[in-house]
């Protein structure tokens, strides 16, 4: 089933690629590639008792991962086609020589200078993303390159992306994930854009045990950003999500696949009336409507007043805050808060920080126990610095506190709290033009209210990689 999903999505790309290719008389084609050889040391300790069919909660191993990659890219006058194949083979930890696939395809066509159509598909077989989940959802920025771009204006806004962050369970588990998307963006006025898109997200575990959750999720979204005048702009976003999930506990309880419809709406007014101090007023609504009558429908309303301080060309501080209201089994008021700071202190050094508090509904996490109404605190700090022309350093720390509330749907009910803290760092050294050597370390600790939530995890990765263009035609 999972390979059919990937083939279907990639076939859709194959349909548009020849159409895009016909739009240009001359094309520039290239073949690039490379790959990496990694040595991984992993250790995870927990007091959890694993469910039947799952690996033991205490997991430690070392393995070598060989990951070749090939990319074919074709550039036309108004279109781009790109396909990357990057399988991986692991040796060690009982998986000697097992092949895991990774395929990414993308086709972009611009019928006019103001209109772009994009198709993309990403298929991956892996077991690594579940090992070290990042509940803080914080990604540090890489060290800036001297003389490199620092951002620009006049680019269309990205279409809404649904968070498909997988949440973890005890032990490593193999799974496949396929994401197919089709989007179109049209610039109809100065700094005014309209986006419309569709996304299909599918998750399949190799073994559906415990609270593992397979799912199919369909998302249709529309976004408009309109420039009212030189000082005001308006943004509005709407999306509809429908999907079903499956898990072993449902089968044991003779329960049908769980279905849910989500409705999301947000609007924001931005003001540039005060130089270097942009202001915004935004409202968002999220609704979850469940097929199972035992599970309470929910809605979350959030109103935010935002302020950004452009301290100087290299430092920015942003703050937004306001009330939040949720209605499900009961009603409650809370608040939403988002604060961030970014500073490029040198030509090759940067620090970024963010903290947020709020409420959200999570229905497609990959783990049935992590779904529900979430109230969270999340924070992260990242530091990047190029120590020399060839050597760079990255440091990261994150913290997250989540409370999950679930209705009684016959499988899970009540509340569950987790607290997770992570530290990480890495060095990267580039040499001989096409090669780089990286050493990375991460430590994560988590404690929670349920058995199996507590664990300590460490990972060390030594990675030798190469990337180069082979030839053009």
Image (cartoon, rainbow, N blue to C red):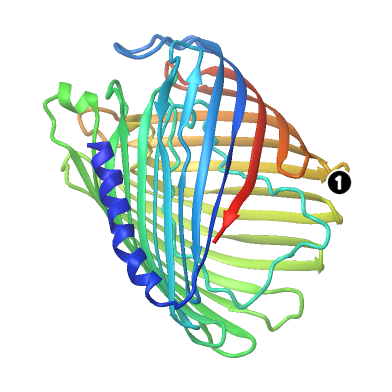
Q: Is residue 338 left or right of residue 358?
A: right
Pinpoint residue 42: horizontal percent, then vertical percent. 58, 17
Q: Is residue 376 left or right of residue 382?
A: left
Residue at image mark 1: 389
Q: Is residue 254 left or right of residue 455?
A: left
Pinpoint residue 150: horizontal percent, then vertical percent. 74, 64
Q: Quadrant of the C terminus?
A: bottom right
Please rate how many residues cluster around mark 1, counting C-alpha atoms within 10 Å: few if below 14, some from 14 to 19, many from 20. few
Task: Say above or below: 233 vs 290.
Answer: below
Task: Say above or below: 253 vs 73.
Answer: above
Q: Do we see residue 185 in this rendering?
A: yes
Q: Residue at x 28, y 21 (%)?
A: 209
Could you say which is closer to the camera, residue 121 or residue 189?
Answer: 121
Pinpoint residue 261: horizontal percent, then vertical percent. 25, 53
Could you say which is closer to the camera, residue 95 or residue 337?
Answer: 95
Q: Residue at x 72, y 37 (%)?
A: 436
Task: Say above or below: 158 vs 327.
Answer: below
């Amino acid at each position: 089933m999972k390979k059919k999903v990937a083939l279907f999505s990639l076939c859709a790309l194959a349909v548009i690629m020849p159409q895009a290719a016909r739009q240009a008389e001359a094309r520039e084609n290239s073949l690039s590639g490379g790959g990496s050889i990694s040595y991984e040391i992993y250790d995870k300790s927990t007091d959890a008792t694993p469910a039947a069919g799952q690996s033991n909660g205490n997991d430690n191993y070392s393995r070598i991962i060989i990951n070749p990659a090939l990319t074919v890219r074709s550039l036309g006058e108004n279109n781009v086609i790109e396909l990357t194949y990057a399988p991986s083979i692991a040796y060690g930890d009982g998986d000697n020589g097992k092949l895991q696939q990774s395929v990414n395809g993308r086709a972009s066509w611009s019928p006019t200078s103001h209109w772009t159509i994009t198709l993309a598909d990403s298929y991956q077989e892996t077991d690594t993303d579940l090992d070290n989940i990042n509940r803080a959802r914080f990604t540090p920025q890489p060290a800036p390159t001297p003389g490199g771009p620092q951002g620009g204006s006049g680019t269309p806004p990205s279409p809404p992306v649904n968070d498909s962050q997988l949440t973890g369970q005890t032990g490593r588990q193999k799974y496949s994930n396929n994401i197919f998307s089709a989007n179109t963006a049209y610039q109809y006025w100065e700094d005014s854009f309209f986006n419309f898109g569709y996304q299909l997200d599918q998750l399949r575990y190799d073994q559906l045990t415990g609270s593992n959750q397979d799912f199919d999720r369909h998302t249709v979204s529309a976004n408009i950003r309109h420039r009212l005048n030189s000082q005001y702009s308006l943004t509005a976003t709407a999306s509809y999500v429908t999907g079903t999930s499956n898990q072993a506990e449902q089968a044991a309880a003779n329960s049908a696949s769980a279905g849910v419809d989500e409705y999301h709406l947000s609007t924001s007014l931005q003001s540039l009336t005060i130089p270097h101090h942009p202001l915004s007023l935004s409202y968002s609504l999220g609704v979850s409507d469940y097929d199972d009558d035992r599970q309470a429908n929910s809605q979350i309303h959030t109103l935010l007043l935002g302020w950004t301080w452009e301290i100087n060309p290299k430092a920015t501080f942003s703050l937004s805050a306001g009330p939040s209201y949720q209605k499900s089994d009961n009603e409650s008021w809370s608040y939403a808060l988002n604060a961030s700071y970014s500073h490029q202190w040198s030509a090759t050094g940067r620090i970024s920080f963010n903290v947020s508090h709020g409420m959200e509904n999570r229905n497609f996490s990959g783990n049935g126990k992590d779904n529900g109404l979430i109230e969270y605190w999340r924070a992260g700090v990242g530091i990047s610095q190029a120590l020399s022309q060839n050597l760079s350093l990255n440091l990261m720390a994150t913290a997250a506190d989540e409370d999950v509330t679930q209705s009684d749907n016959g499988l899970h009910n009540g509340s569950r709290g987790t607290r997770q803290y992570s530290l990480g760092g890495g060095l990267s050294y580039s040499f001989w033009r096409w090669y780089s050597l990286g050493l990375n370390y991460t430590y994560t600790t988590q404690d929670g209210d349920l058995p199996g939530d507590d664990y300590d995890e460490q990972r060390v990765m030594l990675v030798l990689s190469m990337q180069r263009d082979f030839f053009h035609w």
